[in-house]
Image (spheres, rainbow, N blue to C red):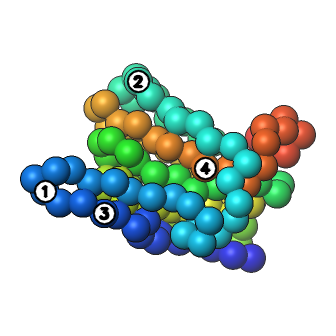
């Protein structure tokens, strides 16, 4: 089973003009079929808490700090912090994340498949 892993997205620019971070073919482990973002999560509200049968995801904290506790089949839980917009987390199928949002955090999710309720694992 593939494990979750962090990687860096390419970024271009300068401090005096701003930065452009890119997620495109060749920089991701799959072709993007869906993109969505999560915003304005109330304090102490945990998101995630489900896995997928086949869906792969790349998660990016485009603003703020997001901490994930990820449980994968047959492995110890790991904690990963996303707090840079160039930092991306690959999340393979059968991983169970608990997602904790810092104040004002925005999480971008890039997915390998369109939405399919039958792909979700809730137990």
* Sooner in the amino-acid sequence: mark 4 or mark 1: 1
For residue 122, which numbered disc appears in the image? none
Q: Where on the picture, by quarter, is residue 20? A: bottom left
Q: Identify which residue is drawn at 73% across, 48% down.
A: 33
Question: Secondary structure under badge 4?
Answer: strand
Task: Note whether 45 is above or below 3 in the view shown.
Answer: above
For residue 110, which numbered disc appears in the image? 4
Q: Residues within 10 Å of mark 3 (few under 14, many from 20)?
A: few
* Sooner in the amino-acid sequence: mark 2 or mark 4: 2
For residue 15, which numbered disc appears in the image? 1
**Cβ atoms under marks 1 and 2 closer than 8 Å:** no
| Spot occupied by residue 41 in the image (x, y as percentages of width and height) | 43, 26
The residue identified by callout 2 is 40
Q: Residue furthest right?
A: 118
Q: Residue furthest bottom?
A: 1
Question: Secondary structure under badge 1?
Answer: loop
| Spot occupied by residue 30 in the image (x, y as percentages of width and height) | 69, 65
Q: Nearer the viewer, residue 37 or 11?
A: 11
Question: Secondary structure under badge 3?
Answer: strand
Question: CA gap, disc 1 to disc 2?
Answer: 27 Å
For residue 12, which numbered disc appears in the image? 3
* Sooner in the amino-acid sequence: mark 1 or mark 2: 1
Q: Nearer the viewer, residue 29 or 18?
A: 18
**Cβ atoms under marks 4 and 3 closer than 8 Å:** no
Q: Comparing marks 1 and 2, which lies closer to the viewer?
A: 1
| Spot occupied by residue 113 in the image (x, y as percentages of width and height) | 78, 49
Q: Comparing marks 2 and 4, which lies closer to the viewer?
A: 4
């Amino acid at each position: 089973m593939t494990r979750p892993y962090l990687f860096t997205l390419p970024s271009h620019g300068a401090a005096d003009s701003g930065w452009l971070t890119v997620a495109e073919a060749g920089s991701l482990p799959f072709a993007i079929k869906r993109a969505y973002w999560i915003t304005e999560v109330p304090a102490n509200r945990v998101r995630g808490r489900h896995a997928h049968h086949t869906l792969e995801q790349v998660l990016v904290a485009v603003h703020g700090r997001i901490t994930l506790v990820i449980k994968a089949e047959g492995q110890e839980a790991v904690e990963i912090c996303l707090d840079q917009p160039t930092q991306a987390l690959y999340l393979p199928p059968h991983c169970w994340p608990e997602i904790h949002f810092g104040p004002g955090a925005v999480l971008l999710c890039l997915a390998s498949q369109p939405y399919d309720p039958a792909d979700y694992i809730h137990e």
